[in-house]
Amino acid sequence: MDAIDLSLVELLRGNARLSYAELARQVGLSAPAVHERVGKLESGGVIRAYRAEVEPEAIGLGVTALIGIVEDSNADTDDVLEAFRQIPEIESCYFMAGVESFLLKARVGTIAELEQLIVRLNRTPGVASTRTGIALSTKWENRPQPLQPAAS
Amino acid sequence: MDAIDLSLVELLRGNARLSYAELARQVGLSAPAVHERVGKLESGGVIRAYRAEVEPEAIGLGVTALIGIVEDSNADTDDVLEAFRQIPEIESCYFMAGVESFLLKARVGTIAELEQLIVRLNRTPGVASTRTGIALSTKWENRPQPLQPAAS
DNA sequence: GGCTCAGGTCGATCGCATCCACGGAGAGTG
DNA sequence: CACTCTCCGTGGATGCGATCGACCTGAGCC
């Protein structure tokens, strides 16, 4: 993980569809060299996926909610996590310090669907209570930040 | 925005680096047809970007925090937003219903940097108070959900 | 010095991206 | 109904990029 790898990661965070030839020009190596480096970044787990970022409203997901979860005192956290994983509306799941063990980000089409989701969450074994905040608008999301000299 | 467009979006959300030829095979059109459809999805704002998803720890961003912001009663929301936009550590910014006007997701390298960030936020004109929760681990993030028949 | 290995470059081959000309289905109209 | 316009697609051609294999070079080590 040297400075060139870092540049490659930064370039691909900005535009995942850059060709190897273009990446090679940007970092000053040959295309095969870049190909090999990127391959290692992928198999080494640094690059996890390449995703198109889509306007949620355009695919019928106009309602965004952030939901804090308090667990039962006797809950099995792994089971709760597994139950959350089965719910496709939950886009992100963070395990938090504090009273609320989890913070979930969910996207649904309508407020009615959000209501159903909350009911489902409250019924999930191990969940003691939920606290839902509704995002009126997403100002931005997953903005890549410029890379530091960095670790490793 | 028909069923084929929806498939294309779903395929690209799963893997942004699929070739047009491969997309064409998956949806049963020719490569030029797919090329044109994807081009329209991009210029129509449905597809906003293609991004590599990176393991944050690998690039020196091991600390994730979610920060609620309460605004001053006389704050100018646009100014506050603009100030947040200048802070690169803020990856996502939601405008919320409730007492806390914003919810921010930020990533930094160390707890010390998080402390500096919180200080900076509290000093920002228009910010009355902040409430920070630390994510001990990210179970998953930005998981694409399978697409509904959908609107539009 | 001479081995070995990691990580490059170069050259060749094949597939893909992309441009262009052409064709067919469906809607609106006389 | 027949005409035409438009949209959306196909097929062919061409140049670029992905990717493989052979070879090169410098660092570390015996």
Image (cartoon, coloured by chain):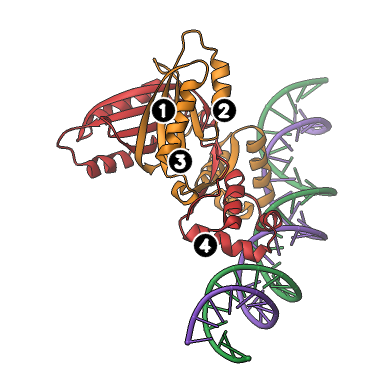
Chain colours: A red, B orange, C green, D purple
Check disc 3: other Cα within 10 Å, few if <14, some if 14-19, many if 20+. some
How far apart marks 4 and 1 lie (CA) works out to 35 Å
Whether label 3 touches label 1, CB < 8 Å = no
> For numbered disc 3, what is the local secondary structure?
loop
Q: Residue at x 70, y 59 (%)?
A: A28
> The residue under label 2 is which amino acid type?
Arg
Residue A125 location in percent, x, y?
19, 35
**Residue at numbered disc 3:** B144
Q: B12 or B117, which is in the foreground?
A: B117
Query: Residue B88 bears which disc, if any?
Result: none
Chain identifier of the residue bearing label 3 in the image: B
Residue C29 location in percent, x, y?
78, 21
> The residue under label 3 is which amino acid type?
Pro
Check disc 2: other Cα within 10 Å, few if <14, some if 14-19, many if 20+. some
> For numbered disc 1, what is the local secondary structure?
strand
Comes first in the chain, label 1 or label 2: 1
| Vertical placement of residue C24 versus A127, above or below | below
> The residue under label 1 is which amino acid type?
Ile
**Do dots 4 and 1 share one subunit?**
no
Q: Residue at x 46, y 44 (%)?
A: B61
Residue A23 location in percent, x, y?
66, 55
Which mark's residue is nearer the viewer, 4 or 3? 4
**Do dots 4 and 3 share one subunit?**
no
**Residue at numbered disc 2:** B85
Check disc 4: other Cα within 10 Å, few if <14, some if 14-19, many if 20+. some
How far apart marks 2 and 4 lie (CA) works out to 33 Å
> The residue under label 4 is which amino acid type?
Lys
**Residue at numbered disc 4:** A40
Query: Residue B67 bears which disc, if any?
Result: 1
Quadrant in which residue A132 is drawn: top left
Would you say residue B136 is visible in this rendering? yes
